[in-house]
Amino acid sequence: MEQEKNTQLKRSMKSRHLFMLSLGGVIGTGLFLNAGLTINQAGPGGAIVAFLAGGLLLYLVMVCLGELSVFMPVTGSFQEYATRFIGPGTGFMLGWMYWMCSAVTAGAEFTAAGVLMKRWFPHTPVWIWCLFFIVLLFSINALTTKAFAEAEYWFSGLKVLAVILFIIIGGAAVFGLIHMDGKPAPFFSNFTSGGGLFPKGFSIVFVTMMSVVFSYQGSEIIGIAAGESDDPVKNIPKAIRNVVFRILIFYVASVVILSALFPAKDLGLLKSPFVTVFDSVGIPYAADIMNVVILTAVLSVGNSCLYASTRLLWALSNNQMAHPAFGKLTKRGIPLNALFVSLGFSLLSLLTSVIAADTVFVFLMSVSGIAITITWMGIALSQFNFRRQYIKEGGKLENLQYRAPLYPFVPILCLIMCAVVLIYPLFDPTQRSAVLYGLGFMLLCYL
């Protein structure tokens, strides 16, 4: 029966969909709005090291997930792998934590999209735009998987184009090929001024790692979508190879260019340094163009989160970890009941941001943040146990159509890095409560 349900989900995602889905899931407000803040906190050197370390961690997670997803391309992905290779309790915990994380993030993105629209429609209440975008994204997700994948493909394409243009124009401004507001070329003078590469010491890198990991979140959606890929054996490894290095190039190149163009202390004051760069080189309507790009980024993340939470709730239902009603599919192969509930929880998180901003909403966002790191740990441990079990049962490595390199070093290093990301904020008063909330909810799930 379970196998029959699994095959009912339409395998309609092409290679280009998977590639853009995982790439677009990572390029969002973490890059457009938060990269400048990270440079401000850690300095140019600290930010570059943090994003490089985060990129290494992302690579470790993705190759572990790739091995599992190619061997067992099922919707629900890491929740199912954890259930099978770690234990049902861990599968239950990971599934529900990531479901809540995705649903809460979707709710936050609806609000962000509504706020961005105030630039053009200052007298229209934010909730009207929230409602408009909720209906839009619900419709996209309720039609067909292909409709969702196609919409996300174009959302992601616009974001990628904006980042490439920024790297080209910003790079030209660094070397004086284009002048910003008539000023001389900065070259790399801002790397040495204002305290140098690490103005607050090297330890600040560890403090910013949590926000860097959050910036990279979304790439793991490739595993959730594996069950709806038309050729997972071919498409998943291809997407992983392409995505990880492009993400690293986009983030690290953007951080290097921002660090070269602006003193670190100024970046904490700029609302969006991307807008400032386009404005300063004299591109007409630069602020409006970037507002469209950031709006697209926000809607893309909301779209992906709604998809991820819906598919995870469907998978939880199939594993008897959620009500059977959430496992039902429409004729088009869409888990509509799971979509309604996920959207409902997103709206609830919207409501709590207004009514109980200091308590419930803070709790939800804290749990969401920690959920990503714990999910990544679950993926690494699942792959570690899977490979050990596979060999023990007589399986041959050459029969694995995709395998993570340097086993067991890769999953062990991934677990250690994730543990550092989780443990270090406990010593930072500003982040301690977020970690404790997240770990508390994890224990609650186990209970």
Image (cartoon, grey):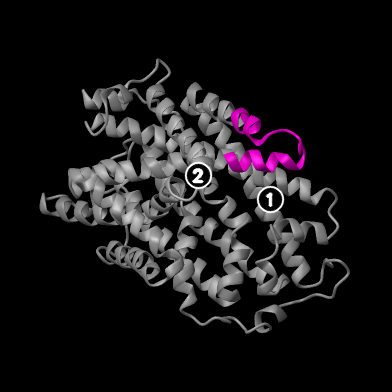
Q: Which residues are magenta?
A: 111-132
Going 11% across and 50% down the picture, which residue do you hit?
A: 394
Q: Which residue is mark 2?
A: 19
Q: Of residues 130 and 54, which is closer to you in this image?
A: 130
* Circle nearer the N terminus (2, 1): 2
- The image position of residue 226, as x and y in percent, is 38, 38
In terms of secondary structure, where does tag 1 sit?
A: helix
- The image position of residue 241, as x and y in percent, is 45, 53
Chief secondary structure of the magenta span? helix
Q: Amino acid at mark 1?
A: Ala
For this view, does 387 lie left or right of residue 205? left
- The image position of residue 375, as x and y in percent, is 34, 51
Q: Does the residue at mark 2 contact the one at mark 1 (Cβ under 8 Å)?
A: no
Up the image or down, 411 lies above or below 199; here it is above
Q: Which residue is mark 1?
A: 162
Tell me the quarter of the picture where residue 427 sits. Answer: bottom left
